Amino acid sequence: MSSSPAAYLLLHLFLRLSSKTCLECIQEGGLFCLDNNKCLVNSTTCNRSVDLPINCPSVPGLQYAYSDEFVRFSVLPVIAAGQTKEPQKCLDNNLPTMKVYKHREANCSFMFSDVTCAGFTGYDTTRKLIVLSIRGSHGVHQYYDLWKVGNENGTVPFLGIGRVTKVFHDNFESLWYGGLGEDMHNLIRKYPDFEIWVTGYSMGASLGLITSAYIAQTGMSNPQNMKVVLLGCPRCTDYDFAMWHSMNFPYSYHIIHAHDYAPRVPFFDNIDNISLYHPRTEIWYNNEMREGDSFVICEQTDQPFCSSKVQNLSTPDHAHYFNIDIVRWSLSGCPKNREDFKPIFGTHQRIHIEDYKFEKSSPVFYVLVSVVVVVVVNYL
Ligand SMILES: *[C@@H]1O[C@H](CO)[C@@H](O)[C@H](O)[C@H]1NC(C)=O
Ligand SMILES: *[C@@H]1O[C@H](CO)[C@@H](O)[C@H](O)[C@H]1NC(C)=O
Ligand SMILES: *[C@@H]1O[C@H](CO)[C@@H](O)[C@H](O)[C@H]1NC(C)=O
Ligand SMILES: *[C@@H]1O[C@H](CO)[C@@H](O)[C@H](O)[C@H]1NC(C)=O
Ligand SMILES: *[C@@H]1O[C@H](CO)[C@@H](O)[C@H](O)[C@H]1NC(C)=O
Ligand SMILES: *[C@@H]1O[C@H](CO)[C@@H](O)[C@H](O)[C@H]1NC(C)=O
């Protein structure tokens, strides 16, 4: 399943002449200038330039195009269902032909016995779908576990693809071997021709990303047959993994609400001294995500483009996607009337970590600040 960067551009095209030029340009040691789509030997005359092949401009092909309506009304209920112990209610209220196969919960901390990871598998014989949805982190013990193990234990190699953050890798394994993997095997065996959706929110999005790679790389399913949709996904993969995933998954979107802090961290792993990257494709809504609101389909893969351009980050933006308080909506069974679950904080009331200087402080400190803010907000 290895592919060349050129194949990666073909998968995503929209072949633009500039994409090929960009790749050649960087391979020849240049910088590709986005202002005028020209190759530079000297970057001082360009405002926005690309220096990594992964960031050469391209967007998904038309048959894999992003649709706000599809994600808002068909995928969001699956993601929200994954946040509760009773996912069927959320499905009944939104996708009546979809059935929960099994909900799974597994211990996923060496430090705390009350920290668990959870998710469910489901199927829909009308739409011919198998779905998988993984819950986000919750509770001070889990935040502390993620912060501590995340900062102290670095990354591990994953199936020859690249490296993934150890804490998310371990959590993926706890959940997968805690039953989710067996359930996916059973469903795929029973419905071999169904499309597979892999989804998640927050930490669950990171676990979903790793799970999608596992399913593809172990041959359980072909990535062409999968849709990966992640909300507010923290970074958990290195350059090679991000490149591999971008090359192999034609339909994979990670959605970022405005200044949500979670998808912006961590950007560097201090233990292994490597930068972390999201795979393609980022969808960035720099607004309230109401119906009809605009979004950016990021032509680059990750930093320093699209949402990475904003520096003042927000915790409430992480709780609110598609103008809904995700956890509150899911715990109420995801009623059809979404109006009652609008965010309590408006844009102007965001709690911001103002003017955070990425260059000057350590990511460890940054993640700590985020955790503290999350904890404070959860006690409000
Ligand atoms: C580059 O930035 C400068 C200053 O912000 C601006 O005046 C100029 O038009 C930009 N050039 C291009 C090609 O975008
Ligand atoms: C880079 O650009 C600067 C200013 O435009 C110029 O002085 C310098 O000679 C250029 N360097 C190269 C290697 O082209
Ligand atoms: C998690 O661990 C606790 C105590 O160590 C145990 O009581 C509980 O059954 C475990 N839960 C799961 C889902 O394995
Ligand atoms: C993290 O690293 C520390 C120190 O090397 C070790 O004691 C601990 O067991 C590790 N934890 C995990 C979850 O790998
Ligand atoms: C970290 O990586 C950078 C760039 O690859 C290198 O210059 C630096 O020496 C490395 N630092 C450590 C402590 O390994
Ligand atoms: C966020 O920072 C930008 C500048 O980087 C500033 O223009 C904007 O007003 C800030 N937004 C808020 C809500 O603080």
Image: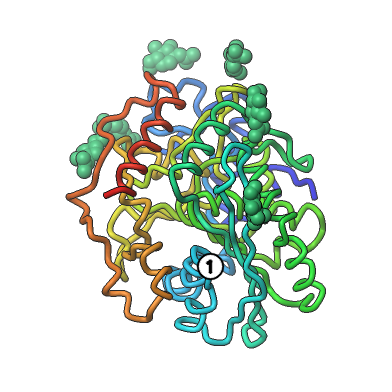
Q: In this view, does 134 lie to the left or right of 291?
A: right
Q: Residues within 10 Å of mark 1 (few under 14, many from 20)?
A: some
* Residue 130 visible somewhere in the drawing: yes
Residue 349's spot in the image, x, y percent? 18, 49
Q: Nearer the viewer, residue 109 or 262?
A: 109
Q: Which colour scheme is used?
A: rainbow
Residue 332's spot in the image, x, y percent? 39, 73
Q: What residue type is labelled 1?
A: Lys
- Could you say which quadrant of the image residue 191 lies in? bottom right
Instruction: Using the image, determine if residue 270 lies above or below residue 19.
Output: above
Q: Nearer the viewer, residue 220 or 292?
A: 220
Q: Is residue 90 left or right of residue 290?
A: right
Residue hosting label 1: 85
Q: Which of 146 and 282 is in front in this view?
A: 146
Which structural element holds mark 1? Answer: loop
- Could you say which quadrant of the image residue 218 lies in? bottom right
